[in-house]
Image (cartoon, grey):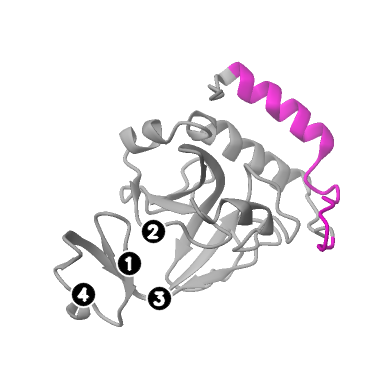
Amino acid sequence: MKIKYTLAAAFAALAVWGATSVAAPFEHKGHKPSKTKIDRQLRNQLAQMRVATAPYATDLEKAKADGYRIITPNMEDMGFHYLNPSISEFDVTKPPILVYARHGGEHQLVALEWVFPKKPKKPPLKGATYGSFPAACHYDDGTFTPASSEADCAPDVNGSPFVFWHPKLVTLHVWIWYPNPDGLYNPTNPLVRPFNGG
């Protein structure tokens, strides 16, 4: 059964989530608990993220209607990445990328992501750690191929037209909708491994 989130449900979830705190260790066989400390400001930012993205939690079609489009296939221990190209500034209530896991035809939002041309001098979120994504050509069906310049991008891949190219990026994942024993900001999450098959 697909869960439909309402604003009231989002606030109820926040109340429970806030009471349990992200700082509490999350146990998972073979993984040590995350040591991420959550201060008041970060807790408020995370709460804002959850309220802002609650409409997308189990409704990929809503995200698409609001301008998010697929930019990667299902990436191992992450999920499918959807980008809203109209978002260019850091705002905790407007993530440019939504990351979804898929199981049995259903999609669930698991993480939010921001990208930067270089590592920010001041972390936009307390304790932020970063990943990276190589320079790449992206195609309409979510396929991407590494390429050092846009001139190296083929006009299409397997019939899917070229959409955009970007240089190497610094990435910031926030696992706000799915627990991650490797940390709130870790680029990958072992708990979404069962969904790697899509």
Of residues 110 and 197, the one drawn nearer to the viewer in this rendering: 197
Callout 2 amino acid:
Thr
* Distance from the alpha carbon under mark 1 to that under mark 4: 10 Å
| Residue neighbourhood size for the residue with mark 3, other residues' Cα within 10 Å, grouped as few (<14), some (14–19), many (≥20) | some
* Distance from the alpha carbon under mark 3 to that under mark 4: 15 Å
Callout 1 amino acid:
Phe
Which residue does the numbered mark 4 point to in the structure image? 153
Callout 3 amino acid:
Lys
Contact between marks 1 and 2 (CB within 8 A): the answer is: yes
| Residue neighbourhood size for the residue with mark 1, other residues' Cα within 10 Å, grouped as few (<14), some (14–19), many (≥20) | many
In the displayed structure, does residue 77 sit left or right of residue 27? left
Give the mark toward the camera: 2 or 3: 2
* Distance from the alpha carbon under mark 2 to that under mark 3: 15 Å
Residue at x 77%, y 34% (from the top left corner) = 18
In the displayed structure, does residue 117 sit left or right of residue 17? left
Callout 4 amino acid:
Cys
Contact between marks 1 and 4 (CB within 8 A): the answer is: no
Residue at x 32%, y 67% (from the top left corner) = 144
- Which structural element holds mark 2? loop
Segment colored magenta: 8-32
Residue 168 is tagged as: 3
Of residues 61 and 15, the one drawn nearer to the viewer in this rendering: 61
Which residue does the numbered mark 2 point to in the structure image? 72
